[in-house]
Amino acid sequence: MKALRDLEIFHQAADTGSLSEAARRLELTPAAASAALKRLEEELGVPLFLRSTRSLRLTDEGRVFLEHSRQAMQLLIEGQEAALGGSADSRGVLQLSLPSDLGRNVLLPWLDEFQAINPGLQLRLLLSDHLADFYRQPLDLTLRYGKLPDSGLVALPIAPANQRILCASPGYIRRHGAPASPLELTGLNCLCYMLSEYVHDRWRFTRDGQEMTVQVTGDRIADDGDAVRRWAVAGEGIAYKSALDVAGDLAAGRLIRLCPDWRGETVPLNLVCSDRRRISPMVQKLREFLSRQCTALAATAAAHLG
């Protein structure tokens, strides 16, 4: 469908800032991509990009059209599928952004199972802990922990009661001992996570209505949750991780929960989209599937939470 393809080229060019890169990603020649943009501009009667030899930048009209055309493209995809006798329930493309640790080590096999149930579905995955930008990236959904930074987004709860826990490997505990209270973390090597240059080194806990925040330090900081978990499993220090991330390690004995009488902060897991109109039947099916899987995994984690 030419209109759909032209919009896809426009979106890729806007996202990458490069017509040649958009053509490469879509396996087109630069000439074909340029012709598609020219068609769009002629049909609209306005320029979508300001072009130079080194850059491609959206015009004001291009920015307005980009926001509306993303929604239109989703409707076109669903209409094309329906016309072909398919259904948005079982066909089409979902572009997902997933957190690094949970995505690689938990979600990938779950999504394999989901695709086996829905064989007409194509998934495009972005694995990163950096916050996704629905307005600059070609995304349908993102799976994220915690509160939404943008109140205009829509959050579909997946694991609302998920919490962070303290954990370390048996080897680390043998060498350095287990803290009896979070206050003792100040003398131990803590593995910290960083997001957008902000280091999460103030760890919060509650017990019987009492709240405690501990400033921790350590010799390792990463902006990738998977790296922090791997360091913990390798015995390099103590981690403060989502229970869903480490449920398998706890069950296998690779990690042991510390200070079990203290509760870590709640970090709900949500499936996030930019607009309620994007909650298609397929998105609803994915949400229900992930909720069931997370409930089962949370039960595994709960057996080790005390």
Image (spheres, grey):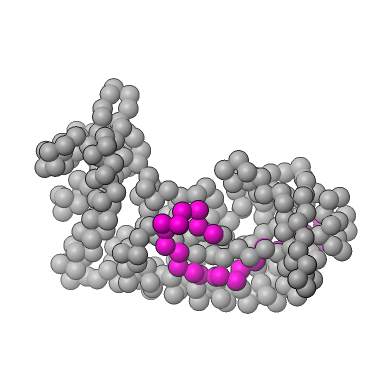
Q: In the rendering, at what x and y percent does residue 166 appear?
A: 74, 61
Q: Is residue 133 visible?
A: yes
Q: Quadrant of residue 136?
A: top left
218 in relation to 170, above or below: above
Q: In the rendering, at what x and y percent does residue 9 appear?
A: 25, 43
User: Is 172 part of what is drawn in magenta?
Assistant: yes
Q: In the rendering, at what x and y percent does residue 143 appear?
A: 48, 60
Name the side, left or right, on which 127 lies relative to 278: right
User: Residue drawn at (72%, 73%), measured in percent from left and top?
Assistant: 304
What span is in magenta? 147-175
Quadrant assignment for the C terminus: bottom right
Name the side, left or right, on which 109 lies relative to 115: right
Q: Residue furthest top?
A: 53
Name the side, left or right, on which 84 lies relative to 93: left
- Closest to the observer: 175 or 245? 245
Q: Quadrant of residue 78?
A: bottom left
User: Residue drawn at (72%, 72%), measured in percent from left and top?
Assistant: 305
Name the side, left or right, on which 286 lies relative to 69: right
User: Is 194 part of what is drawn in magenta?
Assistant: no
